[in-house]
Image (cartoon, rainbow, N blue to C red):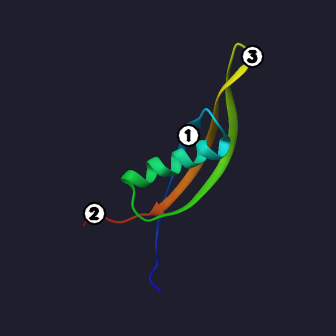
Amino acid sequence: MAESVYKIIELVGTSTESWEKAARAAVDRASQSLRDLRIAEVVQLDMQITDGKVEAYRAKVKVSFKYEDSH
């Protein structure tokens, strides 16, 4: 099996409904411009609060994808 290298980026997804949808938003957006996504790891969850009410759920996600040389 050939060696492979993977790059990891960190994204923050948001949702007004849930942390799950926030994480999914980050992965869905990443999949629009990156190929060969492999792993998504939720590393932090938080909420945006305005006037004592939850406005948005936020999920910080590390996403890995296969690193391909441009040559």
Q: CA distance from mark 3 to mark 1?
A: 22 Å
The percent position of residue 4, horizontal first and vertical second, equals 46, 73
Tag 1 or tag 2, which sits nearer the N-term? 1
Task: Name the residue rendered at 54%, 54% in the picture.
Answer: 63
**Secondary structure under badge 3?**
loop
Q: Quadrant of the C terminus?
A: bottom left
Q: Is residue 1 above or below residue 22?
A: below
The answer to whether the residues at label 3 and label 1 have Cβ atoms under 8 Å apart is no
Nearest the eye: 46 or 55? 55
- Name the secondary structure under disc 1: strand
Apparent side of residue 43 relative to residue 13 in the rendered image (left or right) = right
Residue under label 1, please give it. 12
Residue picked out by circle 3 = 52
- Tag 3: residue type? Gly
Tell me the amino acid under the disc marked 1.
Val
Q: Position of residue 20 (x, y in %)?
A: 65, 47
Query: Distance of mark 3 from mark 2, alpha carbons?
Result: 49 Å
> Of the residues tagged 3 and 2, which is closer to the observer?
3
Amino acid type of the residue that numbered disc 2 sits on in the rendered structure: Ser
Name the residue carrying label 2: 70
Query: How crowded is the residue under tag 3: few (<14 C-alpha within 10 Å), some, or many (20+)?
Result: few
Outermost residue, front direction?
17
